[in-house]
Image (tube, rainbow, N blue to C red):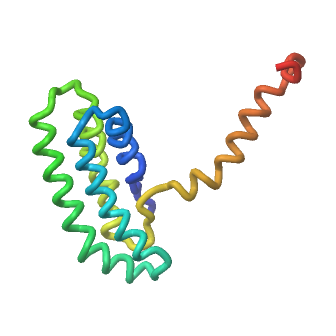
């Protein structure tokens, strides 16, 4: 059976962009909480899926539960159309997929490895589109 696991890097990116422009102390707090999850992932990288699952159950599950509870509280305090509220809603809407890694040690926290692997293919495809056609070489 195939199930969708959401990417923590995608959630993180939304909050990172807010911190980069200095827009939100809430976003900074989210980044710290996600960093704690990534620290655990760094420790368990390369271990068996059973070991990863056990560590996630003990260490990551409470952090994730606290993060989502905290995000729900923060969302109620934010203006509905603010960028921080949008990033928060994105995280909350993807909660089920983000929590999948807590129940399966085979799942990675993000898709960064895959994205890096396919980047050259995507760049080559785009370059071929630009260079195709009679006037493509001139461009």
Depth check, front residue: 100 or 87: 87
- For image coordinates 31% across by 80% down, the residue present is 54
Q: Residue 108: x and y, percent? A: 44, 64
97 left or right of 122 in image? left
Q: Residue 64: x and y, percent? A: 23, 60
Find residue 23 and report its image quarter. Answer: top left
Q: Eyeballing the image, is 3 above or below 89?
A: below
Q: Quadrant of the N terminus?
A: bottom left
Q: Eyeballing the image, is 117 above or below 46?
A: above
Q: Quadrant of the C terminus?
A: top right
Q: Residue 109: x and y, percent? A: 41, 61
Tag count in the figure?
0
Q: Residue 74: x and y, percent? A: 13, 41
113 left or right of 60 in image? right
Find residue 130 and report its image quarter. Answer: top right
- For image coordinates 14% across by 45% down, the residue present is 72
Q: Residue furthest top?
A: 135
- For image coordinates 22% across by 34% down, the residue present is 85
59 left or right of 131 in image? left
- For image coordinates 26% across by 42% down, the residue present is 27
């Amino acid at each position: 059976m195939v199930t969708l696991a959401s990417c923590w890097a995608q959630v993180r990116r939304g909050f990172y962009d807010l911190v980069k422009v200095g827009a939100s102390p809430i976003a900074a707090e989210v980044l710290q909480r996600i960093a704690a999850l990534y620290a655990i992932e760094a420790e368990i990288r390369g271990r068996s899926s059973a070991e990863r699952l056990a560590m996630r159950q003990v260490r990551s599950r409470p952090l994730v539960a606290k993060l989502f509870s905290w995000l729900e509280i923060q969302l109620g305090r934010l203006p509905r159309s603010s960028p921080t509220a949008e990033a928060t809603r994105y995280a909350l809407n993807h909660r089920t997929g983000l929590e999948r890694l807590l129940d399966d040690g085979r799942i990675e926290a993000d898709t960064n490895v895959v994205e890096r692997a396919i980047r050259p293919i995507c760049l080559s495809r785009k370059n071929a589109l630009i260079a195709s056609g009679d006037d493509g070489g001139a461009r």
